[in-house]
Each structure stands twice: as structure tokens, then as C-alpha cells.
Image: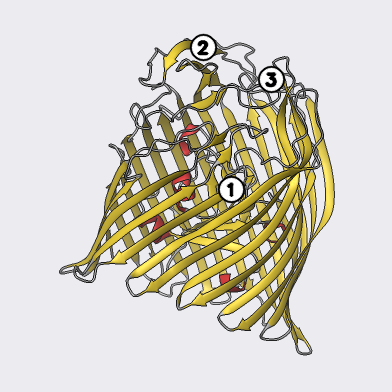
Amino acid sequence: MKIQDVPYSVNVVSAPLLENKLISQQDDFYRINPSIQTFSTSTRGFSANPILRGFTVPNSTGTAEDGLRFQNLFAMPLEDKTRIETFTGLTSFLYGANNVGGLINYVYKRPTAVPYTSLTLGNYGGLSGFAHGDFSGPIDKEGRFSYRLNVLGQDGTTAIENRSVRRNLVTGALSFQPNSDFNLTVIGSHHDQIVRGIDPAWNFATNPDGSSRIFHTAAPDPTKNFGQPFSSYNLQRDRIGADLNWKIDDVFTLRSAIATAYASVRDNIFVNNNVNNNTGTYSQSVSRLTDFFYRANTGYTFLDADFNTGPIHHKVTTGFYGNDFTMSRAPTNYGAFTFNGFNFITPTIVNEPNFVATNVGPVRRQSYNNNRNIVIGDDIKFTDQWSALLGLNYAMLSGQNFNTTTGLQTSGYDQARLSPSASLIFKPLPWVSTYVTYSESLQGGQPVSNSGSMIFTNNGEILAPYVGRAYEAGAKAQIGGTLVTLAVFNVNQVLQYNQYNNDGTYTAVQNGRQENTGFELNAVGTVFDGFRLFGGVTLIDARVTQSQPSPTMPALDGLRPLNVANSLAKVTAEYDLPFAPGFTVTGGVYYTGPAPVDRLNTEYLPSFVTADLGLRYQTKMKPFGNDLIMRFNVHNITNENYWLTPSYVGQPRTFALSVQTRF
């Protein structure tokens, strides 16, 4: 189904755009996407979390790979992806139970029918050099077997002092396609990443009722590392999967896929900067976490039936979709060290503390989550103008938490629900489609676990599953070479947050609902010959409803939820210089509106704007005729100092470049 005909809001970022912007990590992709607000950074030790339609979407529940839901908590490499699809709003019919904000689907590069080779050397910023090879083509003369291989190496210091990134990536794909009706593809990947001098998390003191006690000062110099050079994480992830697409006859098509992934994170040393007064100083807490291990399994099998009942055309889909996720770790504790009297002007470097292991024990399961879905849907075409997409998803969610010292289960849930989805599509013109959509989704509750100074009275519990609902109306128009999409929406789900108890402890609670009403306008494509555009505007009125007061906090009704910006406006553009063949000017402007820092809305982070500027040159090299592409980009060209989120500082001005040859 074409994007123009999909009754959901979706935008697509292609591999060429990622390459031309020299984007290597998720938060750089979030930065240019008009539908995404960044919640956390990629160099903090886990993958960056996005905010979609005003809802924070954890990567544990909000990502998919080739349409397969993966609870991937780690940095996602982008060099082996052919595109990134961002769905805003509920997509439970397409992807099973998930967050009401939306879902991001990372699509792997696939084998090609003709030989293809790409070699790239470059620098992602600072002295962080990289080399990337992309190779593809048929294996046998008949072209039944084909392959794709992506190999990446990156190493060096970044534009931020005392930070280095080392990455290695190998992703291979093998396809078997004996005819146009059958395709079997196997994709495997290995990714390892070591980051030293990771982003510190800034914590500003709050009052017992949750309001800000210490307000954010001007953001510190983003080129300086206010963490510690020895802070680090070491990630390894291995994934293998296979997918089958078989058109059995003119009526039936079988689609099936399965994948498994295993990841480990070692050498976890994190830094928290705690601001408890207005003297211009802060204390720093340095802690080491025990190693974590994750295993995820995912798969689906669908049977599509394409047929007519009189003048009405049907494409009925039925099948099963599921995924599970196990997290394991030892009960070992290393404690934390606190240093006082640091200032916002010059980072203070200390020696790495001597972390002493206590409560040492074997690796055991900490949590297990399972998500199973039985799906049936019908894509109904009444006429060339009118159609409908109807679906039912019977979602079965279960989860357990375990004590890693004893191995005993501490809490769990097991709940099932039938969730409907319905869309009506009207095409007044062949190049215009309009739609209305309603959908529901059962979602798993928040797992609760102590972390650093956050001590929970309900540690080890899992909050109850809950239902999210979404209403959406939209229009899409293909105007020349540009696809313009518009959507208005109302999305709501239960409000979950950590409630302070005025005794140094917290309780994770579900209290009230978060209801977001908004508007999205996006455009992508060729506006006129030589000028290409990717951008849009998102406006959100987010409010809390149906909340109850607590002993330490009043009711939150009518207030804006934490961290939700009321507006996003982002545009990326390219212009081929007519007077200089082969040269293209690239650039972008990215705006994020003000967002509340605390639940009582006593403090807001100010809005911020960053801009990029770049130049690309492409030519044919003689005598072989292969493409030569040279790129130079400056991110945050004015070197703005800004708070990206209440806990993280935005990235500094960064110079990136690459030289690529393709043949």
C-alpha cells in the first residue's frame, strides 16, 4: 500500500538522506524528523528515546526492525538500514500492542539484483573517523541467490572533549528468489560499541509536591564534557532473522518472519550531576552498574487472501504476531561515589573510584515480558474512491519481575483484550486521499526498579496494563513530486509517573490520563527540479485529566505533562546549484518549542533552534564511470548552547565530512 493510501500518519527517511546528512546515531535522526522530539541521547549508555505526539516512547516497546517488534534498549546502527519509517499514532493493528505515540520501524538493506559496491571514508565529528563498505549483487548466473554485506568501523574522539566512540558493524543478508512469487531472506548482524566519557544526566532539585525548587540555568558549554572520562558503556549485540514472502496463487499470499537477538552491556559507569542550590555549583554522583544481558525473540505469520464479493474487493489478513524479552543480571552492587563543589564553567576531572563489589552472585533473570497477538483485518475497496480498513487484534500480555538474589518472582501480570481498529478512506481525486481512523491498544504497565538515588516503595512491581485510544483524521496529496500530509488527532492513555513520598522514597503510580490533541503537517519530495524538501510542523495541546491528589501533590488536571513541547517545526532542504554542475547546497532549520520541566508546570525549558549547513559534490570518475560523492556538513552551525531535555544538553557545533565512491 502506498503511503498516500495508508490511513495513518507516517514519514520515511531514506538511506540517501541519512548518508547526505552524515547521520550515524538515533538522536541525529530524531533531530531532523518533524514528528519526533528527543527525550534522551544515544551516548548516555542506552538508545535514545523519542517523544511521538507528546508521548515518550521507550525503545523497549516503540521500535521494530523489518516490521518485527524488538525490545531494543541499545544504540541502533543506521548504516545498514535502507530507510526508517516513523508511524505516529496507534499502530496496534499493524504491529501489535504498542505505545499510543507511535512506532519507529528500521528497515534493513536488502540484496540487489544487479551488482552494487559503495566505499565511504569520513569523519562524524572531532577525530571520529569511519570507513563503511556496502556490497551487493547476485551470486549465481540465474540470479536466484543474491547477497548484501555492510561493514563499518568507527573510532576516535568526538566534538565533545574527553569523549570517544568505537564501533564495529557487520550485517549480511542472503536472499533466495527462484521466481517473482517467492522470496526467502536471511539477515544477520553483529554490532559492538564502546563509548568513553558518556553524557552525564543533570538533575535539578524539586520540592516535595514535584514542582521545581532549583530552576535550570543557562546550558553549560556543550563542547565540554561535564561527566568523567572514565564513564563508559560497552555494548555487543547479535541478531539473526529470516523472512518469507510467498504468493501461493492469485488469491493467497503467505508472509512469515522470525528473528532473535542477544545483547550484553558491560563496564557501565554512569554520571549524575545534581544541582541542589543556586550557588552555581553542583555535586556529582558516579556509579557503576552490574553487567546486563538481554535476549529478544520475535516473529509473525500472516495469510493474505485477495478476492472479490460482487463489486467489492477484499484483502483479508489473518495471523499471529508475538515477541518476548528477557533481561538478566547479577545481584552484584558496586555502590556510588559523590563529589561536591563542581561548577558550571570548567569541568572537574577526578580519578576513577575504586568500585568494590558487594552482594556478589550469579546472573539470573530480572524480568520477562511476552506480547502475543492474534490479528484479523480486511482492506475493503468499495469503489475507486471509497475504501475501508477494519481490524481486530486480540492482544495477550504477560510479564514477570524476579529478585536477582534469590531468583524468586516478585510480581507479574497476565492480561488479554480485544482491540478494534477502523479506518474509512475517501479519494476525491486520484492524487488526493482523506481518511478517518479510530484505534485502541492494550499496553504493558511500567516495571518498577530502584536506580541510584531513586528508591521505590513498590520496587520489583509491574504496574497494571492499560488501554490507549486514538482518533485521527487526515489528508494526503501528491502534488507534483512532493507528498504533502496533514493529520489532526486526539490520543489518550493512562498517566504513569514517580510520586515523591516526602521521606526520600518514591512510588510509581498510575494517576489520571494524558490526553493530547494536535496537528501535523509534513512535506517530502522534489518541490521543483533541483530542490528537495523534507520537513513539517507538529502542534500539540497536551493535558492531564482525571487525576487525583496525593499527600504530597495536588491533582494535575489541566496541567501539561512533563517534557512535552507544544510545537515542533523542522525542515531539511537540498538545492542543486544550476551554475555549478554537481554541487548541491544542503541545510536545515530545527525548532523545538518550550516544554514543562516539572509536573506542576512551575518551570519550562525554553524553546531552541539549531541550523545545519553543508555542501555536496557528485561527479563521474573516468575511465570507469563510477560515482564520486564528497560531502561536508556543519551541524548546529551557530554552536547554540541549549537544554535538549531537562536532563541532557544539546550537541555542539560539529563538522562532518565523507568521500564515497559507488559502482
Residue 334 image offset from top left, x and y in percent: 56, 14
Outermost residue to the left: 623
Badge 1 or badge 2: first in the primary sequence: 2
The label shown at residue 369 is none
The label shown at residue 455 is 3
Residue 577 vertical placement versus 353 (above, below): below
Q: Return the residue nearer the eye: 522 or 7.
A: 522
Q: Return the residue nearer the eye: 414 or 59.
A: 59
**Distance from Cα at disc 3 to Cα at disc 1:** 31 Å
SS of the residue under disc 2? strand
Q: Are marks 2 and 3 in contact (CB under 8 Å)?
A: no
Given the image, on which type of amino acid does mark 3 rest? Ile
Given the image, on which type of amino acid does mark 2 rest? Thr
The answer to whether one can see residue 497 in this image is: yes
Residue 574 image offset from top left, x and y in percent: 34, 63
Q: Quadrant of residue 626?
A: bottom left
**Distance from Cα at disc 1 to Cα at disc 2:** 36 Å
The structure's colour scheme is secondary structure
Residue neighbourhood size for the residue with mark 3, other residues' Cα within 10 Å, grouped as few (<14), some (14–19), many (≥20): some
Residue 325 image offset from top left, x and y in percent: 67, 41
Point 41% across, 27% down: residue: 197
Identify the residue under disc 1.
566
Q: Return the residue nearer the eye: 341 or 412.
A: 341
SS of the residue under disc 1? loop
**Distance from Cα at disc 2 to Cα at disc 3:** 17 Å
Badge 3 or badge 1: first in the primary sequence: 3
Q: Are marks 3 and 1 in contact (CB under 8 Å)?
A: no
Given the image, on which type of amino acid does mark 1 rest? Asn
Taking the image as shown, residue 424 lies to the left or right of residue 478, namely right
The label shown at residue 338 is 2
